[in-house]
Amino acid sequence: MLKENLIILRNIHGFSQEEIAEKIGISRQAYAKWETGATVPDIEKCMRLAETYGVTIDSLVTTTTLDGGETIVPPPKGKNIWGSVTINERGQLVIPKNVREMFGLSGGQRLIVLTDDKEGIALVPAKVFEDKMKQVMEFAAVKPEG
């Protein structure tokens, strides 16, 4: 788990073991042992690693895999990967319980479906979307002085 995430994150950010070790105040050899799984960092070092990579400590030490077995890169702070859902024959899908709880979603609640031709689909609670649109419209209505 942790060792795989350390390798993935270091490579994504383009750091050498030496560079990341220097950033968190340890030797390259100590860091190398974390990547092999021979040792693990203490909580303070985990916090420094998470800050350096812009992830949470939880996502740093937890490995998420897709149904096909592929490991997912730890997401940045504030971003989440909840796994996959399957669309049934009627075009319906079930939103995972932990997602419903986190966003306070319940049966009958309206969601706005947003898409990007290249990126995919996003679901946003209607109230959140409508409030954001109201802010945009208010901003657009402000006339510059002069």
Image: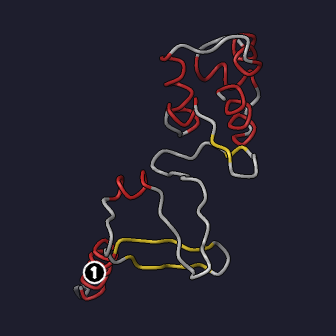
Instruction: From this view, report whether residue 34 is shown above or below residue 2.
Output: above
Residue located at (58% from left, 63% from top): 85
Rendered location of residue 4, percent (x, y): 72, 31
Rendered location of residue 84, percent (x, y): 61, 58
Rendered location of residue 106, percent (x, y): 31, 66
Q: Quadrant of the N terminus?
A: top right
Asked whether, in this view, residue 44 is left or right of residue 23, the answer is left
Residue located at (55% from left, 37% from top): 59
Rendered location of residue 26, percent (x, y): 63, 12
Instruction: From this view, report whether residue 45 is shown above or below residue 70.
Output: above
Local crowd at mark 1 within 10 Å, few (<14), some, or many (≥20)? few
Instruction: From this view, report whether residue 42 is shown above or below residue 5.
Output: above
Instruction: From this view, report whether residue 6 is shown above or below residue 73.
Output: above
Q: Quadrant of residue 110?
A: bottom left
What residue is pinned by disc 1?
A: 139
Q: Quadrant of the C terminus?
A: bottom left
Q: Quadrant of residue 61?
A: top right
**Pick the front one: 4 or 16:** 4
**Pick the front one: 91 or 41:** 91
Residue located at (75% from left, 46% from top): 69
Q: Quadrant of residue 134?
A: bottom left
**Pick the front one: 51 or 58:** 58
Q: Outermost residue, front direction?
A: 89
Asked whether, in this view, residue 47 is left or right of residue 133, the answer is right
Q: Secondary structure at mark 1?
A: helix
Residue located at (57% from left, 46% from top): 75
Specify the color scheme: secondary structure
Asked whether, in this view, residue 3 is left or right of residue 144, the answer is right
* Three-letter code, disc 1: Phe
